[in-house]
Image: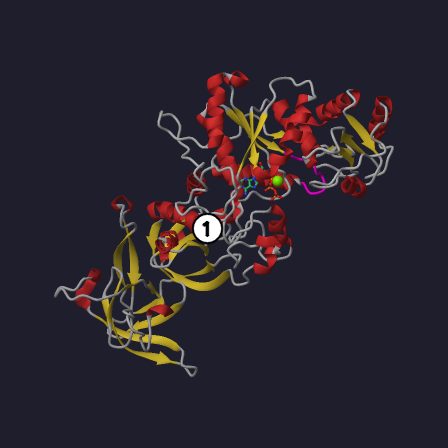
Amino acid sequence: MTAARDGRDSPTSGATRTGGPSASLDFVREKVRADTASGRFGGRVQTRFPPEPNGFLHIGHAKSIFLNFGIADEFGGQCYLRFDDTNPETEETSYVDAIRADLDWLGVDPAGEVRFASDYFDQLYAWAESLIEKGLAYVDDQSAETISLQRGGFGQPGVESPFRDRSIAENMELFRGMRDGAYADGGKVLRAKIDMQADNMWLRDPVLYRIRRVAHHRTGDRWIIYPTYDWAHGQSDAIEGTTHSVCTLEFADHRPLYDWCLENLDLPGDQPEQTEFARLNLTHTVLSKRVLRTLVHDGFVDGWDDARMPTIRGLRRRGFPAAAIKAFVERVGVAKSNSTVEIELLESFVRDELNRSALRRMAVVKPLKVVITNWPPGHVEWVDVVNHPDDPGAGTRRVPFSGELWIEQDDFRMEPPPKYYRLTPGREVRLRAAFFITCTDAVVDGDGTVVQVNATYDPDTRGGTAPDGRKVKSTMHWVSVEHAWDATVHLYDRLFVASHPGADGTDPLVSVNPDARETCAAKVEPSVGDVEPGHVVQFERLGYFAADLDDARVFHRTVGLRDEWANLQKRSR
Ligand code: ATP
Ligand code: MG
C-alpha cells in the first residue's frame, strides 16, 4: 500500500499541533488528551522510547522518538529513554552510546537518568516468583522447539505441557535452580500459565525466562537467566511510572499479554496502557535492524554510518538536517494501519530546509578544461558572487577567475542535441557572475574524447551582463584551474532498486543497488575549503552537498535540486 499523495498515511493522521481548540490531534494524542481531561493517571503523562541496544537508530525510530518525546512535551509530561536490554547475545555498550548520541543530535532530551530494563532484573525476578506463588507460572523442561510446536497456530489447538501442573513449591525450587545455575542453557524455561487454547497465540503460556550463560553488557555474569521481551517490557513501564506506552503495530497482538502480566502483579502505581501506531516504511528503503546489520556485516556499505544508510548516523553524514527529519515524520503523521511513504517526500523536506540554510558555492564534479585564448596571460580577476540568492544578509564572496577554468563535461557538446543551450562550438554562454565566453573549438584525443575546450571571452561582460543587452541562453558554473581545490564527491542513487524491497517475502538484499554510490574527483572553488565538517552547501546547479564529518575534503550529495516529490504529485494528478 502506498501513502495518500499528500503524504499522510490515512485520514486518521493529524497535525501535531496542540493548544488551540481547533487543533486536530492524531489518535494517540487524542487518547492522551482524553486521559488528562478525565484525570486518569492523576492527570500525569509519561512516555518512553525503548530501543534495544542491538544496532543503530534509523529514520523509523525517529518517528517513534518524535511521537513519544512530542507527546510528553505537549502535555507537560516526561519521556524517558529506556534501553530494552534483555538479549545479552546481541547487545553492546557501543550501541547504547551511539543511540544516546543520535537522540542528542535529533534534539530530544530524555527525562532524568537513562534507564535500562536490566536495572529492573531484581524486581522482574521477584515478580516472577510472585506469579509462581499465585499458581500463574511454571517451569517447563521441554526444549524450545517442542514448546513452539505445542503452541499450535491460529485455528489449531495448543498442547499443554506435561509439566504444566507442577506444584507451586516444585516450581519455586526449580525456578531458583534456574537462577542459581543448576541447569544447562535451554534446559528449562519459566512459562506463564494462561490458556493453551487462547485465540491469541501470545497467551498460550508464553515463555517469561530462559537460561543463557552469556555475559550481559551491564550486569556481567550476575544473571544467567534473562526475562523475555514480554516479561520485561510492561513491567519496566510500570516500574518507571509510564502512563502511555506507545509502540508499533506489531505489538498489538502482545497487548493482552502486556495487560495480563500487569493485572497479576502488585504494582507500585497505576497500570500503564499500551497503544500501537503504524511504523514508518519508506520506498526504496529497508527499516529493519536485522537487514541493516547484514548490509554492514556483509560489506554492502562501509558501516552503520555510511551515507547510503537510512540510519540516523547515515542520514546525518549525508547532510539531512535533524529539523527536516522531524518535519517529515510530523507531516507523515500517526496512523492505525501500515503504509509506505515515498522517499521523495522525505527528500523534499530536506531540500526545503537546505534551500533556506545552505550557502551557494561552485564546484565541478566531472571536470573539463576550458582555455580562454584571449585572456591576459597570468591575470587573475576576483569576482563577487552572492552566497544566497534569497538572503542578502548572507553576503558575497570573492571567487578567482583566470584563463583556465574547469566546467562540467555535461556542459559541453561537440555536436549539440536539439534544445541543448550550453557550450558548443560557435555558441556564447555566461559563466556565472563572471563573463560571457564563446567556444571556438575543442581538442579531442585519439578515442574521440573531448579533453579541452577553447573559447574567447568578452571583456565588456564583466559581472555576467552585456552592455549591449544581448542575451545568452545558458549560465554555467566554473572553477579556476589554478585556484581549484581537489575534493572527493560522492553522488548517490537509491540503496535498493525495488520500490518495496522485500515485499512478498522476497529477500530485500537481492535488490541492493551496487551503483548506489558514484565517487568523483571534483574541483571546487577555494572557499569550499572553509566548509566545516557536517555542514551543507549548495553546489550551484548540482544539488546540496554535505562536508563529511571526518574529512571536510569529502562531500556527500545530500539531495539534488529538482523537487521530485512535486513531480510525482503532478504525474499522479
Ligand atoms: P527490528 O528492526 O529488529 O524490528 P526495532 O527497529 O523494532 O528492531 P527497537 O529497538 O525494538 O528496534 O525499537 C525501538 C522503538 O522504535 C520501538 O518502540 C519500535 O516500535 C520503534 N520503531 C522501530 N521501527 C520503527 C519504524 N519503522 N517506525 C516507527 N517506529 C519504529
Ligand atoms: Mg523491535
Q: Residue furthest left?
A: 468
The residue sitting at 13% across, 64% down in the picture is: 469
Please rate how many residues cluster around mark 1, counting C-alpha atoms within 10 Å: few if below 14, some from 14 to 19, many from 20: some
The correct choice, above or below, for 309 with respect to 131 in the image is: below
* Left or right of residue 506: residue 385: left
Residue 461, x across and y down, in percent: 19, 65
Residue found at x 50% / y 16%: 39
- Residue 335 visible: yes
Q: Is residue 87 magenta?
A: yes
- Residue 85 located left or right of residue 389: right
Q: Under tag 1, what secondary structure?
A: helix
Report the magenta residues as a range: 84-91
Q: What residue type is disc 1 on?
A: Ile
Q: Nearer the viewer, residue 381 or 565?
A: 565
Query: Which residue ends up furthest to the front in the rendered image?
Result: 155
Does the magenta stretch mainly form a helix, a strand or a loop?
Answer: loop
Ligand 1 shows up in the quarter that is top right
Q: Position of residue 94 (x, y in %)?
A: 63, 41
Give the residue number, with chain letter if any, for mark 1: 343
